Each structure stands twice: as C-alpha cells, then as structure tokens.
Image (cartoon, rainbow, N blue to C red):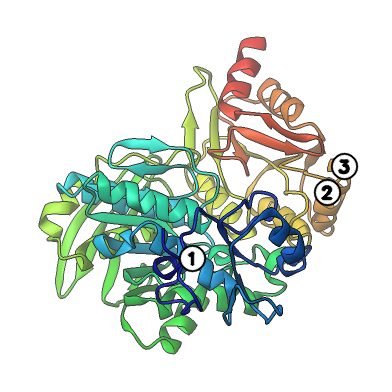
Amino acid sequence: MKLSELLKGVADPPEDIEITGLFSDSRKAGPGSLFVCLEGKNFDAHSAIPELIGKGVAFFVTQRDCGIPNQVVVPDTREALAKIWANRYGNPQNSLKMIAVTGTNGKTTVTTVIKNLLTALGHKTGLIGTCCNEIGGEVLHAERSTPEPDEFFELLKKMVDAGCEYCVMEATSQGLEQRRLAGIRFDIAAFTNLTQDHLDFHGNMENYYQAKKILFSQCDRALINLDDEGGRRLYGEISCEKYGFTVKDESDFSADAICLRPHGSIFWYCRKRRAYKTEIRLPGGYNVSNALCAMAVVELTGENPEEFIPLIKDINGVRGRCEVVNTGRDFTVILDYAHTPDALENILSSVKECAEGRVVCLFGCGGDRDPIKRPIMAKAAAKYADFLIITSDNPRSEDPHSIITQIIGGLAGTNAEYIEIDNRREAIFWAIKNARPKDTLVLAGKGHEDYQILKDGKIHFDEREVVKEALESL
C-alpha cells in the first residue's frame, strides 16, 4: 500500500513509497515497513529508531523530530496509529452505523441486549466486547474489551464484508485514553455509570472521568444515565444532541412501576407520554437500568417500541453476569463478573432481595491493579452477604495472601463472618461442601473468564467446571 494512502488525514509524507507492513512493536517491524513510535510507561519506541533503520524500516511516524529524513512528526502518535489502521482497512467504520457504550459497570449487558434486539428486528449486527466479538452469528474470541487499532479495524472490515449494518461495542476508559478509537464518529454513545475502578491506570477519579468523556466528543447523539452522579455531570458538560434515562425520576426515557422478581423484572418503559409494559429475564434492579439504556438506544436508531419491547423478554442473561449454575442441589450458585465495589453491591443486594437462606459471597481482587479498592470491596460485600469467602482473583505478579490481607482490612469495625482461603479452587470446593439448604453462593469476579492469571502465567480456570467437580466430590 502506498505511504500516502496510509497517512491520509494524518500527515503529508515528503515522498510516496510502497509500504510492506505497518507496526508499532519494534520486535516485529521488518524491511519496507511503516513504524509508528509510541511512548509507553516503560518504553519509548523513539529510542529504537537506530535499530529499526538497521532492520530496513522504510518510514517513521514520530511524536518529536528525531533528525531523520524518512519521518513525519504528529502531535499524538497513538491517535495517528488508529487513523493509519483505519486507512489500511479502507475505513470500514464509514460503512457501519457505530454504537458505543461506556461506563464502569453494565457495558457488556447493555451492548449484548442492543445487539440481540437489533438482530431480532432484522438488522445484521456486529458486537465488540468483553466476553466475545460477534459478526452476525459468528462468535470470535476477544482479547480486550476495546481492541487495539489493528484488531479493531480488521474486525470492522470483516463486519462490512459480512453485510453488517451496525457495530455495537464497549468503549473502555483505557481504550479511549490510548486513542484506539480516534477518528471514529459514533451515531450513538451511551453512558451507564462511574464508580471506582482502574485507578492503577488513571491515577484518580477525575482522570478516569475525563477518559470516559472523550467518547462524547466523537458522537452525534448521547444517552446518559441521570441516576448516576457522573452521568449528571457529563450531561451538563457535553454539547452534542443528548438524552437522559432514569429509573428513579422522569426524563427522555424512564422506567416506572418496577417489579423485581427472582429471575427478571417487569416495569413500564416510558417515553413521550407513552408507556409500554416490559418484561425482562435479567434479574436485579441494576439490570432494569441496563435494559432501559439498551431499549432507549434501539429507539434512537429509529425502531418502534411496539415492535422491539415484545422481543426483549426472550433475551437471556449474559454469560457470567448473574449466571445461575444448575446444581441439582438445595442451594443456588451464581457466577458474576462483579469486580468493583459498586458491582458487588449491585449483585449482592439483588440476590439478598430474593434469597430464602444465607447469601454467601466468594470474591477476591486482581493483582497489579488498583489496591485502593481492595478494602472497599470487603465493605461492599459485608453490607449484604451473610458470610464471606475471601480468596484470589487474578493475582498476577502479587502474592495472593498479601492481596487478601489488604481486602480483610476493610472488614474492621464490621461484624462480618468470613474465612480466608488463598487458592480459589479450594475456596470453591469449601463453599460447595459447606453450603446449607436454601443458601445462595455468589462467586464474584471471574464471570465469563475461563482462566486465572498467576505469577507464572495464565492457566485454564472455568468456574462452571470447578463447581461441577466440587458437586461431584460431595
């Protein structure tokens, strides 16, 4: 591909040459390629330019003048990288109606419901998210919730080639801050909520908020959760066409007369002085908000509520989100991805409302991630659970016992009953063995994940399989 085609909308090259490959990883770059220099926390690729010239790299995109003739200097090489990959794949985003959802919690559920509703209405739709990527009915593995630009634009190209009309995706704070979505114009962007998470990356809540806000400078219409403090702030600060949704008050879209049930909810979807009785299979009050957000997005695409509301009752829950495991026993096991204090409170409070016996929560916190939230997670769990099993999540390079000690620190001043079991598999076996009749066991933190990240690397770890083995051992 010609250099001028790759750099279209990014910079004007001093000469036009044929490019054999596009790289931002200095270990992979080869002869005749274009290399984009990124500045990371641990490595600045600009320092590798002499080595890369020796490898035969033909041209460089840099963030500062490196004193070489075969370069263009841009203000932000991460933004440039996204636009270059878009050019590489023919800007497939321009052939799709792009919908993005951001926020701390609820992104996966909201995007999945939107995708399923649009599909049921006859629109071939792609999905990019935490659990998986989908192109119509084809399911693909997802490495990141918001992919790096090379994978992202390749996915969009495959969606276009497959005849997709829509792309519905999760937009994470890291992905937005790292400008992976630069140059994309979204038809609709939705905001679910903002609670503490990813402070290891962003440093503080203000930076986290500002990263989320980036999405709303790239959309034509915004849909904002007005029940959330961060959402109310965001609504007041953005200038695009905007709509609010709420389950507590009245707005452009609202839910009224909410009736929560063990396996779903019934409520009235209210819009423009009209109300529609709605039934969903997603349990918990927080899922009423998620469903409301998804339905509002679908209506903003131009669909008629009278057509899509009857369809939502047939949409099942998302894998690893309040997922009930069939145990064949007199107690219940639920898997949930909750890994923030707010998400843990949401799932446990919902379970508590319907539980006939004890609520037992098994959870941990990820290693090499925000340590501040560890004691806060304990307080959140103790608020609604009758018994806690504190164990590992993805400890990564940290000592699991050290993480657990920090979690337990949050129980000071509470009357919480708990047990500490460092090994997560052993913890699940203990929970199953000691379950009482009518107990509800909530295994929190892993959800859809079928792996665990330890100091020595990633291992296979699917809690559905572990629960089955534990049940068989009884």
Q: Residues within 10 Å of mark 2 (few under 14, many from 20)?
A: many
Q: Which mark is residue 401?
A: 3
Q: Is residue 459 above or below residue 288?
A: above
Q: Which mark is residue 403?
A: 2
Could you say which is closer to the camera, residue 5 or residue 383? 5
Cβ–Cβ under 8 Å for marks 2 and 3: yes
In this picture, residue 159 sits left or right of residue 357:
left
Q: Residues within 10 Å of mark 1 (few under 14, many from 20)?
A: many
Q: Percent position (x, y) of residue 278? A: 22, 53
- Disc nearest the viewer among 2 and 1: 1
Among the two numbered marks 1 and 3 on one chain, the one whose residue lies closer to the N terminus: 1
* Real-space Cα separation, disc 2 to disc 3, in angstroms: 5 Å
Give the residue type that dot 2 points to.
Ile
- Disc nearest the viewer among 1 and 3: 1
Q: Where on the picture, by quarter, is residue 317?
A: top left
Q: Secondary structure at mark 2?
A: helix
Q: Percent position (x, y) of residue 181? A: 46, 66
The residue located at (15%, 49%) in the rendering is: 121
Q: Which mark is residue 197?
A: none
Could you say which is closer to the camera, residue 267 or residue 400? 400
Cβ–Cβ under 8 Å for marks 1 and 3: no
Q: Is residue 147 above or below residue 242?
A: above
Mark 1 — residue? 82
Among the two numbered marks 2 and 1 on one chain, the one whose residue lies closer to the N terminus: 1
In this picture, residue 324 sits left or right of residue 401:
left
Q: Secondary structure at mark 1?
A: helix
* Real-space Cα separation, disc 1 to disc 3, in angstroms: 40 Å
Q: Where on the picture, by quarter, is residue 272?
A: bottom left
Q: Is residue 258 above or below residue 188?
A: above
Q: Is residue 181 visible?
A: no
Q: Percent position (x, y) of residue 472? A: 61, 11
